[in-house]
Image: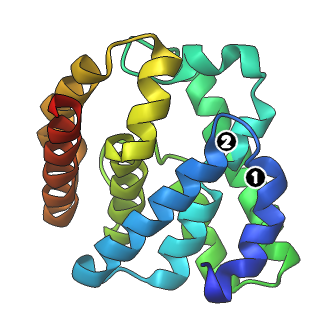
C-alpha cells in the first residue's frame, strides 16, 4: 500500500496503536492519493506526512484523548501536544531512514501544525490537512466517531456537512467531502 514509503510506515506503526490511528492513517492515505491526482502536490512530502501526522498521540495519555479532539469543545493545549510530539517523532523516523533533509524540514513543519494552523503553508500542507479531515467523512469514521463521542450518527453526519466550507482548503477536498457526506447520509437513511 505504501510503496516507497513502506519504511516510513514500518517505523511509524508502533506509534499508531492508539485512538484508531492505524485505520485513520490508512484511510487518510487513500484520500491523499485522490487529492494528489488533482492538486499536484509533492508526493515525497505529502505521503510521509500523512503517515506520520498523528504519531504524537502515542505521547498523550489515553484518558486525555477525548478532551483533545472531536465535535464538542476541546482542549487545544492537549491537542497541541500531539502535534509537537508528532513532529519530534517524525523527524527521528525520517532521519533514521536517511530521508532527504530538505524534505524532512517541510514534513516536520506540516505535522507541527496540521490541526492548529489555520492557513496552510503550501499546497502540500493543504493536501495533508484536507486528507486528515476527509477521514471523518469515511464510512469507517461514521462507525467509530459517533460511538466515541456519544452522539447519533445521523446528527454527526449532518454536523460534518455543515463544516465542509470552513474546513477544506482545496476545491478537490470540498468535492470529495460533499460526495462522502452525501453517501453517508444515503446509507443512514436506507
How many residues crowd around disc 1 within 10 Å: few (fewer than 14), some, or many (20 or more)? some
123 sits left or right of 87 in the view? left
At 72% from the left edge and 79% from the top edge, which residue is drawn?
6
Q: Nearer the viewer, residue 65 or 97?
A: 65
Q: Quadrant of the C terminus?
A: top left
In the picture of the structure, the residue carrying the numbered disc 2 is 84
Coloured how? rainbow
Image location (x, y in percent) of residue 95:
82, 74
Query: Is 58 above or below relative to 152?
Result: below
Q: Quadrant of residue 101?
A: bottom right
In the picture of the structure, the residue carrying the numbered disc 1 is 88
Image location (x, y in percent) of residue 77:
58, 20
174 sits left or right of 2 in the view? left
Q: Secondary structure at mark 1?
A: helix
At 42% from the left edge and 60% from the top edge, which residue is drawn?
128
143 sits left or right of 169 in the view? right
At 75% from the left edge and 63% from the top edge, which residue is drawn?
91
The answer to whether marks 2 and 1 mark residues whose Cβ atoms lie closer than 8 Å is yes
Q: Is residue 121 visible?
A: no
Query: Is 12 above or below relative to 165?
Result: below
Q: Quadrant of residue 1?
A: bottom right
Q: Nearer the viewer, residue 96 or 148?
A: 148
Gap in Å between the C-alphas at discs 2 and 1?
6 Å
Amino acid at each position: 500500500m505504501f510503496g516507497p514509503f513502506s519504511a516510513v510506515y514500518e517505523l511509524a506503526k508502533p506509534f499508531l496503536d492508539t485512538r484508531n490511528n492505524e485505520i485513520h492513517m490508512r484511510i487518510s492515505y487513500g484520500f491523499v492519493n485522490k487529492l494528489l491526482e488533482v492538486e499536484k502536490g509533492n508526493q515525497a512530502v505529502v505521503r510521509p506526512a500523512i503517515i506520520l501526522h498523528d504519531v504524537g498521540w502515542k505521547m498523550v495519555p489515553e484518558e486525555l484523548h477525548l478532551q483533545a479532539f472531536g465535535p464538542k469543545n476541546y482542549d487545544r493545549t492537549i491537542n497541541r501536544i500531539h502535534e509537537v510530539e508528532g513532529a519530534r517523532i517524525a523527524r527521528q523516523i525520517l532521519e533514521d531512514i536517511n530521508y532527504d533533509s530538505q524534505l524532512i524540514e517541510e514534513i516536520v513543519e506540516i505535522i507541527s501544525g496540521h490541526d492548529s494552523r489555520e492557513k496552510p503553508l503550501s499546497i502540500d500542507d493543504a493536501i495533508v490537512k484536507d486528507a486528515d479531515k476527509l477521514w471523518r467523512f469515511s464510512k469507517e469514521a461514521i462507525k467509530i466517531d459517533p460511538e466515541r463521542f456519544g452522539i447519533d450518527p445521523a446528527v454527526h453526519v449532518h454536523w460534518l456537512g455543515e463544516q465542509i466550507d470552513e474546513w477544506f482548503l482545496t476545491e478537490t477536498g470540498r468535492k470529495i467531502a460533499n460526495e462522502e457526506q452525501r453517501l453517508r447520509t444515503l446509507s443512514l437513511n436506507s
